Image (cartoon, grey):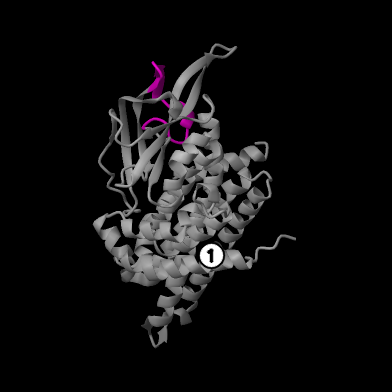
């Protein structure tokens, strides 16, 4: 039977990040959210703790851990501040991991030590105005001319793409095409590293978002942007397939973050239900409240089991694509449902932005959209069932 008890090393990591989240991140979360300011001091501190290097080898400045260690850290951060958690998640799984998985030795040596230390961030440009869930519709193009990739197109909703410490974005682009036997055309999609500051590469103004206000998110424009041929990341034509594998791993990370958000709502609701009195009792005395919170705890518990299972399969070298999709869907829905219920428990206070549950209410919706919508997860699960 599987054992979901954390060993001593994992537990110590989880406890350390929980303490950091409660004592360092939480006190400044409301301010960064209100000011829509990027938490550079928190990112620097996370770098000092080694969180950006958790799943990477020591050769490149990493901690020599694994993806489950990253997930545990994300869960604890997600309890108190989803913006901080997604900055770490995207910095690792979308920024550094593609270089680690598919980069040349020279690319790894050039970029990974900066990324694993938290001194630098990187983004991944996949989504476009007309290519979201259907990423195969990518229209950004890159032509090879005189030893350089010439890139034209646009990307949107790109996390960690415009901070003062962002060094590059990796973009998917159409680098060629082949005609199939039936006469249709298959796009050759590759991934290319584009350093920030490259002429022709513009990081547009940040979005005005509903939530994740302390997370950095921009649209990107490429107009005759030129980078060396050796900036190709991975095999030419394998960019889309490679990124799909990165997404499978990333769904475990998002599930962990969402589990933290769901648990954070439980913790806040329990605390408030014990403190708030009405009609002669604390409100947790009444079944209307206590049963609501009990259901919230059940959701968080099931979400945790789901991402633990997907992560254990991944680390064992087993197929985990479907389990990751299930975990991402279950956990993101738990986060959204718990945020709604926690806000109801808090009543009018739940509608005030300075309270954590209010931020979770605004932040959690994107968990059902980013890195694969709920509908995409259902499609993957149904496909695994042969439907």
Foreground of the two, 262 or 86 = 86
Say which residue appears at 40% left-offset and 25% top-offset: 228
Question: Residue 348 at x, y = what percent?
Answer: 31, 70
Question: Residue 255 at x, y = what percent?
Answer: 52, 53
Foreground of the two, 277 or 41 = 41
Say which residue appears at 28% left-offset and 28% top-offset: 200
- Does the magenta run of residues contain 141? yes
Q: Is residue 45 left or right of residue 1?
A: left
Q: Residues within 10 Å of mark 1 (few under 14, many from 20)?
A: some
| Res 69 → quadrant | bottom right
Q: Which residues are magenta?
A: 129-149
Q: Is residue 61 left or right of residue 148?
A: right
| Residue 327 visible to an observer of this rendering | yes
Question: Residue 127 at x, y = what percent?
Answer: 41, 35
| Res 3 → quadrant | bottom right
Q: From the viewer's perspective, is residue 249 above or below residue 256?
A: above
| Residue 376 visible to an observer of this rendering | no
Q: Which residue is mark 1?
A: 13
Question: Residue 112 at x, y = what percent?
Answer: 46, 44
Q: From the viewer's perspective, is residue 157 above or below residue 239?
A: below
Q: Is residue 111 left or right of residue 183?
A: left
Circle 1 SS class? helix
Foreground of the two, 54 or 17 = 54
Which image quarter is the C terminus in?
top right
Say which residue appears at 50% left-offset and 22% top-offset: 188
């Amino acid at each position: 039977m599987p054992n979901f008890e954390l060993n001593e090393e994992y537990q110590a990591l989880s406890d350390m990040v929980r303490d950091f989240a409660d004592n360092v991140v939480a006190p400044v979360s409301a301010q960064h959210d209100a000011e829509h300011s990027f938490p550079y001091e928190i990112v620097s501190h996370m770098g000092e703790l080694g969180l950006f290097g958790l799943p990477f080898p020591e050769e490149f400045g990493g901690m020599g851990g694994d993806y489950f260690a990253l997930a545990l850290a994300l869960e604890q951060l997600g309890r108190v501040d989803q913006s901080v958690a997604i900055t770490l998640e995207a910095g690792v799984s979308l920024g550094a991991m593609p270089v680690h998985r598919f980069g040349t030795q020279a690319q790894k040596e050039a970029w990974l030590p900066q990324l694993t230390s938290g001194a630098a961030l990187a983004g991944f440009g996949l989504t476009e105005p007309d290519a979201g869930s259907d990423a195969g519709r990518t229209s950004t193009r890159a032509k090879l001319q005189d030893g350089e990739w010439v890139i034209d197109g646009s990307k949107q909703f790109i996390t960690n793409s415009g901070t003062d410490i962002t060094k590059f974005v990796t973009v998917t682009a159409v680098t060629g095409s082949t005609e199939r036997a039936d006469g249709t055309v298959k796009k050759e999609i590759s991934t290319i590293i584009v350093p920030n500051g490259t002429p022709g590469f513009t990081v547009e103004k940040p979005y005005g978002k509903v939530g994740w206000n302390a997370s950095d998110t921009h649209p990107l424009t490429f107009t005759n942007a030129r980078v060396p041929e050796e900036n190709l990341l991975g095999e030419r034509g394998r960019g889309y397939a490679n990124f799909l594998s990165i997404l499978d791993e990333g769904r475990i990370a998002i599930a962990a973050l969402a589990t933290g958000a769901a648990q954070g709502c439980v913790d806040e609701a329990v605390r408030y239900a014990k403190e708030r009195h009405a009609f002669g009792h604390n409100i947790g005395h009444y079944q209307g409240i206590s049963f609501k919170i009990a259901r919230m705890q059940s959701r968080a518990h099931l979400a945790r089991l789901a991402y633990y299972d997907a992560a254990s399969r991944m680390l064992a070298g087993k197929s985990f694509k479907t389990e990751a999709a299930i975990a991402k869907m279950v956990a993101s829905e738990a986060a959204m449902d718990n945020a709604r219920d926690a806000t109801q428990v808090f009543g009018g206070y739940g509608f005030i932005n300075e309270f954590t549950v209010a931020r979770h209410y605004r932040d959690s919706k994107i968990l059902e959209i980013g890195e694969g919508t709920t509908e995409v997860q259902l499609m993957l699960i149904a496909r695994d069932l042969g439907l």
